Image: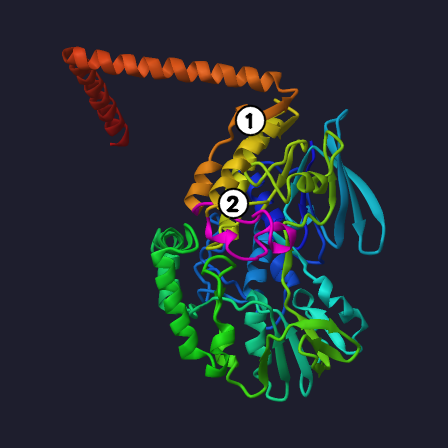
Amino acid sequence: MQLRVLSLSVQGGISTAIALRRQLKHDNFTIYELGNEVGGTWRANTYPGCASDVHTHWYSLSTDLNPNWPQSHVFQPDLKQYWQDLAHKYRLYDHIVFNSKVVSAEWVPKTQVYRVEVESVDGKRLVEYGRILVAGTGILNTPNYPTELSGVKKFKGDWFHSANWNHSVDLRSKRVAVIGNGCSAAQFLPIIAEEPTTQIVQFWRTPMWFLPKWRDTYSPLMQWVFTNIPLTLRWYRNFLMFRQEMLYMTVIRGGPNTWLRNRFMKGLTKYLKENAPEKYHDVLTPNYPFGCKRLILDTGYYESLHRPNVELNNDGIVEVNETGILTKKGETIPLDVIILGTGFLANDLPFHVRGSDGRSVHEYYKQQGGPTAYYGTMTPGFPNFFILSGPNTATGHGSVIFTEEVQINYMIKVIKPILSDLATAFEPTDAASDSYNAWVQSKLGKSVWNACTSWYRAEEGKGKITGIFPGTFVKFWWTLREPVWGDFKVSDGTRWKRRRAIGKVVKTVLGAGALGAGVYAIRNPEVVDHILGNLSKQASQLLSQVSSYVH
């Protein structure tokens, strides 16, 4: 039986493959990778300053902690190397088909498998079949090219998206526009601004809340402690998670106007005024509550605004033309290079999947008013189809690697009966998915994420909240700790149902027996003492026999 794992520029396929080998000893899988090497996000994104904005000791697999991270938030080359090392360690390269993109997948009811069409970079197409399909494409995988910037195609200078950085373009002595002020732009702008001959104008629509710089260096002593003292690194990782959970519980959770949130925002405003140029204080101060958009770490962004070669422009863009940008104030700004730091399309499945009832995933999303999934992981009408970092799985305050591990562990429990030939397919019911998502949206409807436009929401950031899970990481883990089997349609599952029924009976009998034994022991302590006494004598005799053999 073939398990197809799809990986397009993210590490979800690698994480899934590792879990299959460690937990199920399953070796029959294929990973389709769009790029020419392992690394996912950290292979594709190579812009200057590219780094994790989550503590790396938490932004790594729980099964493969790395005591030798040099910093708390390491840069792209180290993260890319980490995932490549894992692929070597678990011998995954033989299972990866590089330079290939999945074009479509369709469930074949008669054979209970997916027909998967794959296209290589040279245009050749092949068809494979797999009973289980895992989309490890991530929540942010498709670069966003806003429609109002479509004129960039007519621009006669160089232009590119930060997700596809063009390293052949020399920015020295160039007039450069940076469009956007999200996580990527906040990382690469300070780096390219270090060259004094590069004249930078940054355009953006909405100011962002910036958290103070948190990057710390780990000394050789600390790395030695992590390596040699048992559990130290594990406890440190748990501490990092606990700290972020406390940020969520005290500041992010709840409605937009809480006392703690307002106090926190005053602190961030003070940080802004202490570090950014005074002339930009007003335009840099957000008019929406903290937590409504993605958290951004200040890795030198405010400091870079003091440079004479950096200018902010929030006049608004009318169009991009052949020579530059026309603002809403009627000013034309001539440019040599345009860099789009406009982020990604959230929850955009980059290939077509058609399920058992003929619907595609995109059609289902449209019917639901935006990306929707059962536990953020499975979709009604799509048997054995799993989405890592699916709808409403992000938390906004921590590690997506942790989230995906929770999903993968859940998936392993669902597919185990399939790989054991006890069933052929599991598919969540519409009723179960609707009930779960009604709960999700009811919680989010009262939350801070309703207070602004963001990529966490559908319909150009103004509709249904499709990115965020309404709770802590612990809550997410608890929700997905065990499958609710009654929520599934099961195909060819007679043997599985029989085995489950027998297991329930055995558990009931054992539980009743243990309870009965306990009651009997309480009522007849002298009998228990007699039994324990005999066991003690037998143990002493056994030890004596062993001792005689030794001597």
Indicate the position of residue 46 as horizontal and vertical percent values. 63, 67
Looking at the rendered image, the quarter that the N terminus falls into is top right
Task: Identify the residue at image location x=41%, y=44%.
Answer: 474
Task: Identify the residue at image location x=72%, y=65%.
Answer: 148
Instruction: Name the dominant secondary structure of the magenta segment.
Output: loop
Local packing at callout 1 (Cα closer than 10 Å; few below 14, some 14-19, many 20+) is: some
Task: Identify the residue at image location x=34%, y=56%.
Answer: 229
Q: Which residues are magenta?
A: 447-472
Q: Nearer the viewer, residue 176 or 408?
A: 176
Task: Identify the residue at image location x=48%, y=47%.
Answer: 63
**Residue 388 lies in the magenta stretch:** no
Looking at the rendered image, the quarter that the C terminus falls into is top left
Residue at label 1? 487
Residue at label 2? 405
Indicate the position of residue 404 as horizontal and vertical percent values. 54, 46
**Residue 450 lies in the magenta stretch:** yes
Q: CA distance from mark 1 to mark 2?
A: 22 Å
Position of 104 compared to 347: left or right? right
Position of 112 compared to 23: left or right? right
Indicate the position of residue 485 as horizontal and vertical percent values. 53, 25
Number of the front mark, 1 or 2: 1
